[in-house]
DNA sequence: TATTGTTATACTCTATAACTATA
DNA sequence: TATAGTTATAGAGTATAACAATA
């Protein structure tokens, strides 16, 4: 059993590394970088939240999240508002423009990925990938 | 069909991004970084090759590959030898120490991944992940 | 002229450390 | 004192540009 886990781990490391490497090359020209898409999608999914809360959920430092959120705000994809009860907190929320970018998948990585999936993968392979995605997400949280 | 591909793409982007983010945090203390593991594994799998050939296969720039290979060589995991026929080329090969590191999975990302898989995933989930890994690798090549 | 490899430089993503403001 | 957020700095991974050596 352990041997199996080891070989799955080794194959996942290589495949996932290769995919992210490619995706990052694409996001140079795109509308959303990988961390930006991740933060924006979480805000959209979970509702307004503070920078610190998002950082905890995304498992990165508050400083890194601050940088990402600043970039999103500068482009009008999210907006900030001070919490009236706790003056320290600044609550971030997705704007209409931000939701639209997500809905349309209007960013290079998502489009390239969807195109490649459509062009080169069978319905059954798509199903296998769809089944694996939540497992991979859970795996990221379990490490 | 296209809609399906889009939603699979969106979920893969998020899950794969989260996993790699976590893995990179681990490889700070580990024996192999993500690109090092990738290059070393390919050399092991495909046999000796030049830096330029490896860069093409891994889809990164020759300069980036040069940096990665220099780090591997410094630790004795690969060794270089000039090609006697073509004086420009330098052929890299995995050393005994390098092969041993790969065989033992003796690096933080691989160990953490294997441990998490063993602890938190059922055999059927492991099978799903094992089935997805080659698809993800193919996807990286298809983008 | 094309290719291999190297050096110099810069950008993105992330981290730690040190600070200010509020609780 | 603890927490939210910011600023400064650094390291890893990648890129492009410019160069030397060989084909």
Image (spheres, coloured by chain):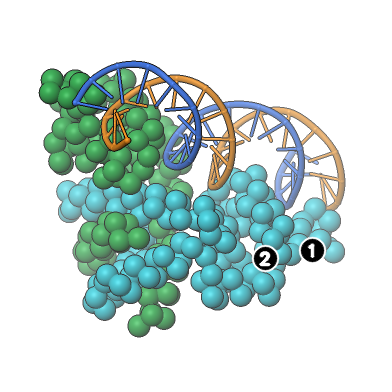
Chain colours: A cyan, B green, C orange, D blue
Q: Which residue is drawn at 40% across and 58% down?
A: B16
> What residue is rendered at 59% in x and 71% in y?
A101
In the picture of the structure, the residue carrying the numbered disc 1 is A81
Figure check: D3 above or below B8: above
Q: Residues within 10 Å of mark 2 (few under 14, many from 20)?
A: many
Left/right of residue A122 with respect to residue B31 in the rendered view: left
Q: Can residue B82 be seen by looking at this rendering? A: yes
- Residue drawn where x is 24% and y is 75% of the image: A122
The picture places residue A102, in percent across and down from the top left corner, at: 56, 71
Identify the secondary structure beneath mark 2: loop
Asked if labels 1 and 2 touch by Cβ distance under 8 angstroms, the answer is no
**Residue B100 at least partly seen:** no
Residue most extreme to the bottom: B1
> Circle 2 is placed at which residue position?
A77
Q: Where is residue A85 in the image (x, y as percent from the top left)?
A: 83, 63
Q: Quadrant of residue A131?
A: bottom left
Q: Residue B61's spot in the image, x, y percent?
A: 37, 39
Check residue B111 in the rendering and tell me which mark sits there, or answer none.
Answer: none
């Amino acid at each position: 059993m352990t041997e199996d886990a080891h070989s799955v781990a080794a194959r996942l490391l290589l495949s996932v590394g290769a995919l992210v490497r490619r995706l990052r090359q694409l996001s140079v020209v795109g509308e959303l970088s990988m961390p930006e898409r991740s933060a924006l999608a979480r805000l959209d999914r979970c509702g307004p939240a503070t920078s610190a809360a998002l950082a905890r959920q995304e498992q990165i430092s508050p400083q890194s999240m601050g940088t990402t959120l600043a970039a999103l705000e500068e482009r009008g994809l999210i907006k900030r508002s001070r919490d009236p009860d706790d003056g320290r907190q600044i609550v971030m929320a997705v704007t209409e423009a931000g939701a639209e970018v997500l809905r349309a998948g209007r960013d290079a990585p998502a489009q390239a990925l969807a195109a490649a999936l459509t062009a080169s993968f069978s319905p059954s392979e798509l199903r296998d990938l769809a089944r694996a995605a939540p497992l991979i997400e859970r795996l990221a949280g379990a490490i």
